[in-house]
């Protein structure tokens, strides 16, 4: 970016937060803020993935990296156009600054023709059938026994109590379809510095019964789950990974707007195993929100 382009970007920023957003606030009494410094805080925090002063020296308009300031500008334009919920952005900023407490997980999230809900004991049988299906489990080392599936179901359900988020059951009018959601990896992964804070990784994943395939539940369910963890829980990013030969899941990651970071050898599989080479993808909250996918999650 040239000096002239940088100066033009900064002028757009000052006009946005000092004039356009405060003027628009008069027509939006439901907005949580109306002052220029509050708009700047919200947009800069969301562009940085945390309190902006932790990564940028003041004044932010002069020292913010151009790509981050451009993201803050995009978020502000989306607020003005009604594509971004300012209340959600403000809530994330206040969570990062420890000004509010994270609310408990809802019982369910609602999509157009499906819902994401918490686990029940009655899910054991259909989940065991899903995990015993060789076609569903073709990218796992082996199908699971009923006991193994039950143990996994209990562990997945506990994630909500442990972390405040977890893998949701996907339920359609015809019943249990599988799960989609976020969790912290159970084992350290040999990522070799591909990501920064590997100790705080959160992954997103899915596993669906074959009758649910082709109905968009993986992508649409993942978007609902991401909107929840990025807004209510204020996570800054999530990752996803799978075997390099698992092209269906790789397509889902790409449709979610995730970017490939690199590859690694899964430590739970032996040398030479066809599933050992894995590919790692990443999605930041700022990019997800800028993409306008945060809306549409109905919480109960």
Image (cartoon, grey):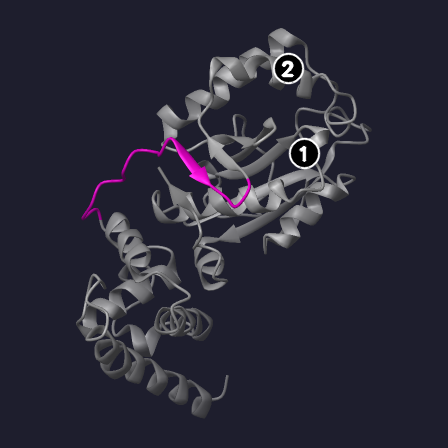
The residue indicated by pointer 1 is 212
The residue indicated by pointer 2 is 128
What is the x, y in percent for residue 36? 20, 74
Q: Secondary structure at mark 2?
A: helix
Of marks 1 and 2, the one in the foreground: 1
- Look at the image and tell me whether residue 183 can be seen: no
What is the x, y in percent for residue 126? 62, 17
Position of 154 relative to 114 (above/below): above
Name the one closer to the observer, 10 or 76: 76
- Please state the total of marks drawn on the protein image: 2
Name the one closer to the observer, 101 or 44: 101
Q: Secondary structure at mark 1?
A: helix
| Residue 146 belongs to magenta span | no
Name the residue located 50 percent from the left edge and 83 percent from the top edge. 1
- Give the mark, 1 or 2, whose residue is nearer the N terminus: 2
What is the x, y in percent for residue 10? 35, 83
Position of 251 relative to 265 (above/below): below
Name the one closer to the observer, 147 or 119: 119
Name the residue located 42 percent from the left edge and 21 percent from the top edge. 158
- Span shown in magenta: 98-113
| Residue 109 belongs to magenta span | yes
What is the x, y in percent for residue 291? 50, 62
Position of 233 relative to 128 (above/below): below
Name the one closer to the observer, 173 or 55: 173
Name the residue located 64 percent from the left edge and 9 percent from the top edge. 146
């Amino acid at each position: 970016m040239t000096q002239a382009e940088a100066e033009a970007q900064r002028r757009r920023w000052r006009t946005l937060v000092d004039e356009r957003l405060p003027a628009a606030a008069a027509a939006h009494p439901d907005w949580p803020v109306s002052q220029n410094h509050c708009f700047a805080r919200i947009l800069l925090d969301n562009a940085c993935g945390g309190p902006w002063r932790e990564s940028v020296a003041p004044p932010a308009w002069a020292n913010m990296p151009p790509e981050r300031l451009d993201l803050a500008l995009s978020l502000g334009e989306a607020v003005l156009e009604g594509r971004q919920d300012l209340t959600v952005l403000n809530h994330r900023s206040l969570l990062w600054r420890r000004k509010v407490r994270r609310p408990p997980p809802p019982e369910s999230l609602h999509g157009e023709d499906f819902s994401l809900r918490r686990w029940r004991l009655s899910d054991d049988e259909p989940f065991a059938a899903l995990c015993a299906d060789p076609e569903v489990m073709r990218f796992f080392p082996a199908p699971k026994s009923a006991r193994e599936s039950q143990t996994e179901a209990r562990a997945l359900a506990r994630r909500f109590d442990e972390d405040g988020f977890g893998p949701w059951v996907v339920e359609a009018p015809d019943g249990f379809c599988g799960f989609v959601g976020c969790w912290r990896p159970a084992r350290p992964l040999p990522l070799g510095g591909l990501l920064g804070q590997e100790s705080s990784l959160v992954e997103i994943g899915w596993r669906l019964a074959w009758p649910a395939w082709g109905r968009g539940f993986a992508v649409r369910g993942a978007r609902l789950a991401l909107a929840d963890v990025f807004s209510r829980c204020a996570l800054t990013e999530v990752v996803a990974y799978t075997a390099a030969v698992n092209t269906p899941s790789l397509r889902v990651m790409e449709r979610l707007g995730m970017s490939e970071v690199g590859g690694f050898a899964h430590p739970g599989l032996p040398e030479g195993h066809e599933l050992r080479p894995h590919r790692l993808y990443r999605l930041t909250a700022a990019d997800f929100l800028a993409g306008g996918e945060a809306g549409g999650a109905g919480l109960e």
